[in-house]
Amino acid sequence: QVQLVQSGAEVKKPGASVRVSCKASGYTFKNYVISWVRQTPGQGLEWMGWISTYSDEKKFAQKFQGRVTMTADASTSTAYMELRSLRSDDTAVYYCARDRDPYTYVYGYWGQGTLVTVSS
Amino acid sequence: DIQMTQSPSSLSASVGDRVTITCRASQGISDSLAWYQQKPGKVPKLLIYAASTLQSGVPSRFSGSGSGTDFTLTISSLQPEDVATYYCQKYNNAPFTFGPGTKVDI
């Protein structure tokens, strides 16, 4: 069965960077993009971007342009999201997600979420 | 970018009630609209895609309709386990924006 397992919770100081991993299993990694979505405390879902695990093509929400990096390692079926210059309002649960069908961006599978806390 | 709005932001209904949630896109998105359910402390779960196609395993009391800019999610007979926040999401092109959510209580 499809599984996305994310790395554990992180606590970071303002200005630091965080890298969250998402290890995929149960399907052919290169056949699906991995997207990242975050949820700030008590708030809704915010789409951050996606990376093609086949071509390395990426697309980011304008809000995160220049501050986010997404990578994918097909040898370990793991995707990574790095967010730099962290601020307190980056405190959120970060999710990786996989399409229900290839390149549809309908998220049928989600990781368990990684809480990133930004605090001095 | 296309903006997504939902109404109401929250509602309270009784078990067995018919519940309708509306999602509106600021520009037409054809039928590229999905609905997700998120229970407290849980991961979002896909309910409906292509505006009206039920995801496998989702109870038939959930249904979706609409096209273009106006969409609805209907729960035909509200159950206690349906307490959750419901989000719509556009996916015709990036950014794949989510609506602000509708919280449903019993």
Image (cartoon, rainbow, N blue to C red):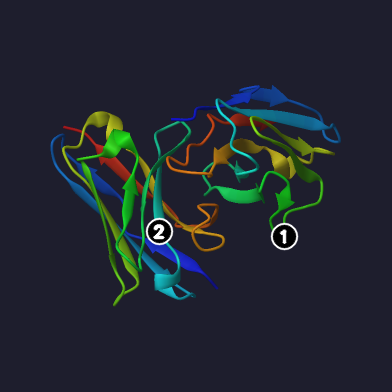
Q: Is residue B11 above or below residue A25?
A: above
Say few, some or many: other residues with alpha carbon within 10 Å of mark 2 (under 14 / 14 to 19 / 20 or more): many
Residue at (52% x, 49% y) in the render: B43
Q: Mark 2 points at which residue?
A: A34
| Distance CA(mark 2)–CA(mark 1) | 23 Å
Residue at 62% across, 30% down: B103
What amino acid is found at the position of numbered circle 2 in the picture?
A: Ile
A5, above or below B52, in the image: below
Percent across and percent down for residue A4 are: 44, 64
In the image, residue A69 above or below residue A45:
below
| Quadrant hosting residue B17 | top right
Confirm whether residue B106 shows in the render.
Answer: no
- Amino acid type, label 1: Gly
Residues at marks 2 and 1 on the same chain? no
Q: Is mark 1 on a helix, strand or loop?
A: loop
Mark 2 and mark 1 residues within 8 Å of each other at the beta carbon? no
Residue of label 1: B57
Horizontal and vertical percent position of residue B21: 70, 30
A96 left or right, relative to B61: left
Q: Which numbered dot is residue B94?
A: none
Check the picture and name the quadrant holding the N terminus of chain A: bottom right
In this rendering, position of residue A39 left or right of residue B47: left
Q: Quadrant of the C terminus of chain A?
A: top left
Crowd rating for badge 1 (residues with CA inside 10 Å; few <14, some 14–19, many 20+): few
The residue shown at (48%, 44%) is B93
